[in-house]
């Protein structure tokens, strides 16, 4: 049985729907999670850290724009096979750097609702649109042709 994290689709924006003002001036709209106090006090129960999963666990991630399938290969380094979105039509080996709101804070190896996933290939970094929900299935074998 799959564990599901996140809820129904919501309107997507660049900041995962978590806006606040900074300095009280109009136009100074920033993500509240971009503030260090908000980041360090965040609950972090609405997602998963890939390095805490097991090899062969499967993760399905629905973002605002795409559906991604991930198969964990090396949990300690967050290496996965990923398929989905415009950049991964076939399973491709990548490393989940983590998730962010597009700024300077990165939740290392994490995939969290409302955040964008940062995936590292040998050539570049791909950032997804905001995560809407996550489903995790434990312990399915990886077909040899994908290794």
Image (cartoon, grey):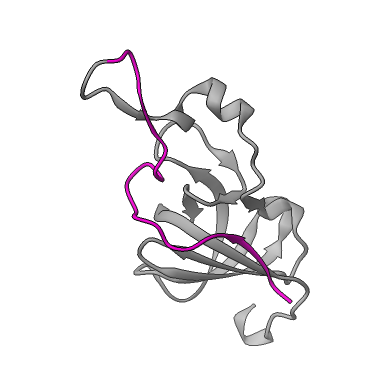
User: Where is residue 27 drawn, in percent x and y?
Assistant: 21, 24
Residue at the spot 39% in from the left edge and 40% down from the top edge:
102
Residue 128 counted in the magenta span: no
Q: Is residue 123 visible?
A: no
Q: Which residues are magenta?
A: 1-24
Residue 9 figure quarter: bottom left
Extreme-left residue of the structure: 27
- Decide: is 17 above or below 32: below
User: Where is residue 105 drawn, in percent x and y?
Assistant: 50, 32
Residue 66 figure quarter: bottom left
* Viewer-nearest residue: 17 or 138: 17
Q: Is residue 117 visible?
A: yes
Direction from residue 109 to residue 8 in the image, left or right: left
Q: Quadrant of the N terminus?
A: bottom right
Extreme-top residue of the structure: 23
Q: Main secondary structure of the magenta part?
A: loop
Direction from residue 14 to residue 138 in the image, left or right: right
Q: Quadrant of the C terminus?
A: bottom right
User: Where is residue 114 drawn, in percent x and y?
Assistant: 47, 48
Direction from residue 80 to residue 122 in the image, left or right: left
Residue at the spot 75% in from the left edge and 52% down from the top edge:
52
Residue at the spot 72% in from the left edge and 69% down from the top edge:
57
User: Where is residue 70 drawn, in percent x and y?
Assistant: 58, 68
């Amino acid at each position: 049985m799959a564990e599901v994290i996140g809820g129904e689709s919501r309107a997507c924006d660049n900041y995962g729907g978590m806006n606040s003002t900074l300095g009280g001036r109009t136009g100074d709209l920033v993500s509240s999670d971009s503030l260090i106090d908000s980041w360090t006090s965040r609950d972090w129960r609405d997602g998963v850290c890939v390095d805490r999963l097991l090899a062969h666990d499967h993760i399905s991630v629905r973002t605002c724009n795409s559906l991604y399938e991930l198969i964990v290969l090396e949990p300690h380094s967050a290496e996965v096979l990923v398929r989905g979105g415009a950049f991964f039509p076939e399973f491709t080996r990548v490393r989940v750097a983590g998730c962010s709101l597009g700024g300077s804070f990165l939740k290392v190896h994490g995939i969290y609702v409302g955040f964008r996933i940062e995936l590292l290939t040998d050539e570049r970094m791909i950032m997804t649109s905001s995560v809407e929900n996550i489903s995790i299935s434990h312990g399915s074998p990886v077909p040899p042709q994908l290794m």
